[in-house]
Amino acid sequence: MGPALKRLGSMPVEVSSFVGRRDELLQVQRDLTAFRLVTLTGLGGVGKTRLALQVAEKVRRVFPDGVWFVELAALGDPALLEQTVADALGVRDYSARSPLAALAGVLAAKRLLLVLDNCEHLRDACARLAAELLAVAPGLRILATSRHTLCTTGERVFQVPPLPAPDPDHMPGPEELCRVESVRLFVERAAAVLPDFEPDAATRATIARICHRLDGLPLAVELAATRIRVLAPEQILRRLDDRFRLLVGGSRSVPRHQTLRASIDWTFAQCTVLERILWARVSVFADGFDLDAAEAVCAGGGIERSSVIDLMAALVDKSILTEVGRRRSVHYRMLETLRLYGREMLRGTGEEPGLSRRHRDYYHGLVARVEAGWLGPDQVAGCERLRLDHANVRIALDFCLTEPGEHQVGLAMVAALWTYWIACGAVSEGHHWLTHALALAPEPTPIRAKALWIAGWAAQTRGDFTGAAAALRECRVLAEQLQYEAALAYSVRYAACAAMAQGDHSGALTLFEDALTRHRVLGDKVGVVSLLVMLAFCYCLRSDAAHGDLDHAKALCDECVERCSAVGESWCRSYALYVHGLALWKQNEYGAARTKVTESLRLSHALNDLVGIGRSLELLAWMDAGHRCGRAARLFGAAAAIWHTVGVPLAGITSLLSDRENAEQRVRRAQGFHTAFRDGEKLSPDQAVAYALGDNETITTRASLPAPASRAPAVTLTRRELQVAELVAEGLSNKEIAARLVIAQRTAEGHVERSLAKLGFSKRAQLAAWMAGRRGNRDQ
């Protein structure tokens, strides 16, 4: 059985209620039972995405491996489709495999639903991807939304109709009118902006005429309903009629796409001049943005920076923008139909080139800040921010590599993303951008030298030592020509990595020591810290007792941990703890080794670092071999699942495989090995970490359906959730909890939110009171 996915799905939170569509919901559910690929088609604004989300929620219980949503509207490059889907499913790959091969490996034994949203501009690529995945994953179903069919074998097409709208010439009675779906939608959305809105029979009849005028198109109805704050329904109808006669010549028999266009035109006309300008300008963003980004990119040219927030609020009130993600900071999104409209308006102003450059500048600055703050406490937050803004970063990179005169900036931006590529397991995407940028910017510049050592590192990570050697040779020649000492240091260190990975430990040590000296002389703190771990690891692999290799390794790890702890760095610290544990294990100091490795595992889990988790699980399995064989077998299974996912067994270090083989052979001789191993394979990374750390009550090795309401289980918190709840009761903030438990702040926030949800609470004070009561009951 293949590895478990990290979560059991990823669905966006719907910010408004779903109205009607009972027949459509039942039909699409039936189609998904009979067909493995179902495509919802229809014009923009008809409600394809909302219907897909509702169907996915209805069938969630049928798919034990989850329902996964992939938004494609912001993706412009078909070459990145596979990586985008892999990112959405949490599939990280560090090998030379293509993202498609990594996806196929993970999905082969899964039973899940994949929702691909907004496929029309990537139709051919989506069709190919669907065909490839469905061929290798018999338990996979795909639900796609597109303005056009994918035109691939086995596709079932469902044309999404508008909502039923009453005929003014045959108006139903008041009771029946209340049940008409388009009228219900208008009333619900109007009540959302005007809470005391309660239409009488005459007003409902007017609303029915509005819905008929808008052909029952959900987006058009929602936009009209938002005007209820400033216009009565009769005024909305009159103004719509006036606008439509102006736009479509008075004909009432016009295509629905023209109706939608007229509706959006009318909404645009209802905005103030500055609101229209901002609507057009924010269309340069992809898949969301925050207030800081909007102020940096969209202010100027008639819009004061201080007024952006009020204009954004006005666009939210008109349902042009939607607020999402309130946990840390508000993010704003725009429906793709409205974003494309805004982009069209922007082109008409002549501002598009300048706005695109300012957009690029903002995200280039963000990337540079994350790189500069990598060695510090903002490491995890920086990666999360880049993951959140991945679509905007891609647009900025695409601008650089397609706009004449911007290629050097693009190369600098790609190079600055090197920590992100490795932390997020997107080495294939990094390789894609590096290859493209290096080809477009051949000038012998320092930034090219930097990009070349990063390309060498990426090639090594993917197991391509020939490509890595070529890139590092060019880097070294260019660095010597430019007298660029930093690039020289990195070219030497990655030459050492190649030697180590291919078994030449003595040669690698010589090169590592040379590189470490260069980094120290340059005062390169990031280079020194990360190289200390590599050097220590190489000493561990050589394990020459006569030269005190293992003691050298432990001393280097201690220096690394000390440096990392001083600045709040976590990534290198987790690896230094692992290597220290490996050295102790080789010296038969098992208790001390286990302490180091479990601490490393906690950090790797907080960082969501699958390679680090896999390494620690492996080493803990070795430690348990021979005396706790059942536990060791489960850990071996859990680690094997992770290696299957990331594609790099033991991160490519073949010299450790003999240690692994010896330990596994001891465990295989124990009774029940295969059953325990398979149980371990079924664990998600979260479950495997909980098992390894002893939180056994959180483990479930089989997917289960939710309990019926009549048999609802008692509310229980996991051991970690109870720990966090105890600290909440002590009055600690999420940041303070994260520091106390040595976990990421986002992880602490997640524990708090899950605990509140489980207990039905909305405030931390309620959770604190519950913990106090629990302690009181325990003490009685």
Image (spheres, rainbow, N blue to C red):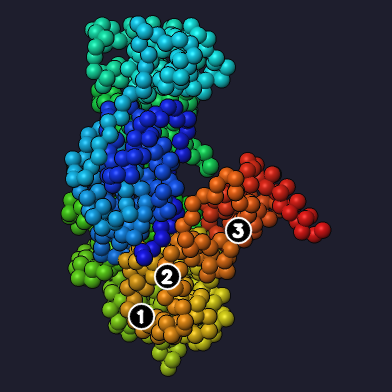
In the picture shown, does residue 315 fall above or below 599? above
In the picture shown, does residue 82 fall above or below 476? above
- Number of the label disc, if any, that sits on residue 103: none
Q: In the rendered image, which residue does mark 3 sit on? A: 718
Q: Mark 1 is on which residue type?
A: Leu
The crowding category of the residue bearing disc 2, from other C-alpha atoms within 10 Å (few below 14, some 14 to 19, many at least 20), is: many
Please identify, in this view, whether the residue under mark 2 or under mark 1 is nearer the observer: 2
Name the side, left or right, on which 194 lies relative to 21. Answer: right
The residue lying toward the viewer, choosing from 318 and 521, is 318
Q: Residue at x 45, y 14 (%)?
A: 177
**Residue 574 % position (x, y):** 48, 68
SS for dot 3 = loop
Q: Mark 3 is on which residue type?
A: Thr
Q: Name the quadrant containing residue 98.
A: bottom left
Of callouts 2 and 1, which one flags the residue occurring earlier in the amino acid sequence?
1
Q: In the rendered image, which residue does mark 2 sit on? A: 678
**Residue 415 % position (x, y):** 30, 55
SS for dot 2 = helix
Q: Quadrant of the C terminus?
A: bottom right
Q: In the rendered image, which residue does mark 1 sit on? A: 657
SS for dot 1 = helix
